[in-house]
Amino acid sequence: MADTSQTQTAGPQWLGRAVLYALLVVFAVYYLMPLFVMITTSLKTLDDIRAGNLVALPEEISFAAWVKAWGTACTGVECNGLKGNFLNSVSFVVPAVIISTLVGAFNGYVLTMWRFRGSDVLFTLLLLGCFIPFQVILLPMAQTLGYLGIANSIPGLIFVHVVYGLAFTTLFFRNFYVTVPSDLTKAARIDGAGFFTIFWRIILPLSPAIIVVSVIWQFTQIWNDFLFGVVFSSGERQPITVALNNLVNTSTGIKEYNVDMSAAIIAGLPTLFVYVVAGKYFLRGLTAGAVKG
């Protein structure tokens, strides 16, 4: 009787797992289908695109569209491809991510380990920055960039993204540092460690997980930003998102869907690479306290 009951129980369990995996496969295919179409279209010739259908594999694999998207595609009046705009994005995304992460770590350290009168009010005001729409700050930010003399420049884009990202990075680090025992800083003070020594030698070495969270978040938000790029830059200083929009919406000549798809993949590769390499650390950082407190 025992063997029969176990067999009867195993049957429904096996069926349930089969249904679950089947649903997961369907959802995965549905989710990945746009990426599949983009990759296959980017590897097709124009004749292949016209003769085939959307999900058909390329008759002949060609990287000509990738080469053109990178080096010779028109992104407006210029036909220099995405290469220059890609380097523009790198030149302001990397400094903005580093600065906003370090300042956010310092803010979180101060708001958690060195409480002062009004610290809770200040933290609340910083939190409000997470909910301010981009459009609200366009005119004030444009005036500020003009006063500072960095309008329409790479330093200006760095400044904009650092300022807008500080609310998020401060939130991440503050909520992580809340979980750090205060005895560590008290013991360090007794041993004679000062304000900055505690931060550099004790707090930051404990923060790799939340640093990864901040870096991934900021990198993704800044690299994918279009509004700030199109408003606060022009010409040769535009980021890759603006150049991609100009390339896709070019209305002269033959519509080259393979070049458009190649350009879109090139623009998305850095964020995809970051998530593939550091995605598991992102989850670890979140569960380590990034959204607690």
Image (cartoon, rainbow, N blue to C red):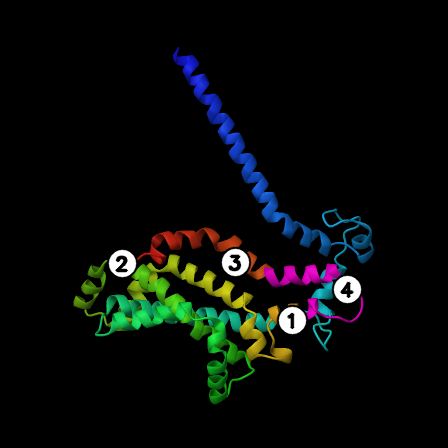
Q: Which residues are magenta?
A: 246-268
N-terminal of the pair, mark 1 or mark 3, is 1
Q: Crowding near pointer 1: few (<14 within 10 Å), some, many (20+)? A: many
| Residue 102 visible in the picture | no
Q: Is residue 293 left or right of residue 87?
A: left
Q: Which residue is mark 4?
A: 255
Task: Please state, as top left, top right, bottom left or bottom right, where the C terminus lies in the image.
Answer: bottom left
3D distance between C-alphas at marks 3 and 4: 31 Å
Task: Please state, as top left, top right, bottom left or bottom right, where the N terminus lies in the image.
Answer: top left
Q: Crowding near pointer 3: few (<14 within 10 Å), some, many (20+)? A: some
What's the residue type where badge 2 is placed? Val
Residue drawn at point x = 53 percent, y = 32 percent:
19
3D distance between C-alphas at marks 4 and 2: 56 Å
What's the residue type where badge 1 is placed? Ala
Taking depth in this image into account, of 42 and 24 the one nearest to the observer is: 24
What's the residue type where badge 4 is placed? Lys
Where residue 243 is drawn, which disc sits there? 1
3D distance between C-alphas at marks 2 and 1: 44 Å
What's the residue type where badge 3 is placed? Val
